[in-house]
Image: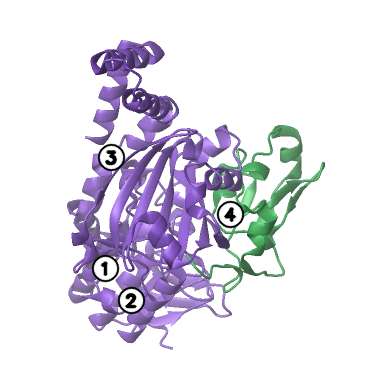
Chain colours: A green, B purple
Amino acid sequence: MSTKNIEEKQYLLRFKADTKSHLTVMDDDICATKCPDKICTIFCPAEVYKWEGLRMQVGYEGCHECGSCRIGCPYQNIKWEYPKGGHGIVFRLA
Amino acid sequence: MPEKFDVIVVGAGPAGTSCALVCAQKGLNVLLIERGEYPGSKNVMGGVLYRKQMEELIPEFWKEAPLERPVIEQRFWMMDKESVVQFGYKGLEWGVEPYNNFTVLRAQFDQWFAKKAVEAGALLINETVVTECIVENGKVIGVRTDRPNGEVYADVVVLADGVNSLLSKQLGFHKEFRPDEVALTVMEVINLPKEKINDRFNLEDNQGCTIEIFGDSTKGNLGTAFLYTNKDSLNIGVGTTLSSMIKAKLKPYDLLDYLKTHPMVRPMLAGGESAEYLAHLIPEGGYRSVPKVAGNGVVVVGDAAQLVNAIHREGSNMAMHSGLLAAETVIEAKYRGDFSESSLNLYRQKLYDSFIIKDLEKYKDATHTFENNPQYFKEYVPMMNKAMSKFFTVDGTPKRDKQKEIMKSVTSERGTIKVIQDIYRAWKAVK
């Protein structure tokens, strides 16, 4: 079978995005100066985090709400909440 | 809606719904709060539901619940790059009543299960996030939700808010988890016609198979992969501790694709169509990560209490049983009219007397041992494969000489003393 890249995998899903992000990078300077690996951009299973040179772009709309970024950020620099009730990812199968 | 309930349950997964169901059956006034559009819309698991703990809640549930296949075969693969050492058990007794376990798709199952709690009298409110517990004089007296005027009160609040359990963290029952206490797992549901599944897995209709895959499935990192059969789809997933994922700089979806295209796995998926991609954390800290589970006016159940036996991939059963034990405790506390911590500590006692904590205690050092000793996954799995290959390749070498050669190659790769240490350490971690 064909594998699908992460964009295609994300297309398989239904999201009911809120207008406001439930994920906040509290201080972009910490990412810029202290975190050469920007490891959240690697381990996030939905590629929510993308480093844009000066700041972290947070594509919260595609978040699976797993919690990895909150636990895995080496600087506890991510404020993590649940999306508003009824919003965010909607799993239809498993 | 009455302002005060007997019980508020936060989270309509297996743990919360079990607790709500039993409390409602006993006539308690139960509010079950779910943040998703429907129960199951936020919930993920590989897919094995255990009969025993479910049957204690709903006798003969298999006659009406939306299940996929009863599992009649459990296989274990020690996988290298181009080979695999396999063992397993297949038994037809698991294919007839009362069954052992089933594969399920959670979005359907959880909705059905929550409906059972509602039929028993629980009030289910979807699309509502509990933002915090309301604490007064050191006692949890209710919850605050993200709805307007969203305060609700109860004698007891049951936290079934899943692996992240922000609510028990808010109460100081545990600190933030470390990356080595959780496993980041991703999976796909892959549609495949029933006939193909039956042929490829050597099954008949209404027979299921589970395969747990170690070794190269995680590129030697601490974790496992799985491949489970549904009626007309497969669940394939892989996870490692978040700490391993970080250390190896792995992208979880790349690891999943590595698994899907692995020559030992690929033929089983051929022609399949991806239907859904899901990510979730699994609490794998085990015994040492279990937080405080009872306080004044509050108890913690399921993943929120980190009740998962990673070695045996058991979690849903522990969730359900902990929900049941919490319900029994709440019912007794109601009878006594005492919801203090010392009263609700009965739940803790029940939990620690049950198979749940006994099993977690048995494996309390396992994750730690395997995390700190990567040789088990990185070196021994390839060694096992090489040994089997050597032993079963017919090349005119006498078998006794082959055995000697195998032993020599194992001890020369690791060193005799190290091998003995490794065996002893592994035995100690799982004994």
Where residue B290 appears, as percent x and y from the top left, is 34, 48
- Residue B146: numbered disc: none
Identify which residue, B194 or B230, lies in the foreground. Answer: B194
Kind of residue indicated by mark 1: Met
Q: Residue pushed farthest bottom? A: B1
Q: Marks 1 and 2, how far apart in space?
A: 11 Å
- Nearest-to-viewer mark from 2 and 4: 4
Q: Earlier in the sequence, mark 3 or mark 1?
A: 1
- Residue B363: numbered disc: 3
User: To which quarter of the image does residue B301 belong?
Assistant: bottom left
Q: Marks 2 and 4, how far apart in space?
A: 31 Å
Kind of residue indicated by mark 3: Tyr
Q: Marks 4 and 1, how far apart in space?
A: 35 Å
Q: Are marks 1 and 2 in contact (CB under 8 Å)?
A: yes
* Tag 2 residue: B65
- Nearest-to-viewer mark from 4 and 1: 4
* Tag 1 residue: B54
> Label 4 crowding class (10 Å Cα cut-off): few <14, some 14-19, many 20+?
some
Let me know if residue B413 appears in the view. Answer: yes
Q: Marks 3 and 2, how far apart in space?
A: 32 Å
Q: Marks 3 and 1, how far apart in space?
A: 24 Å
Kind of residue indicated by mark 4: Met
- Residue A1: numbered disc: 4
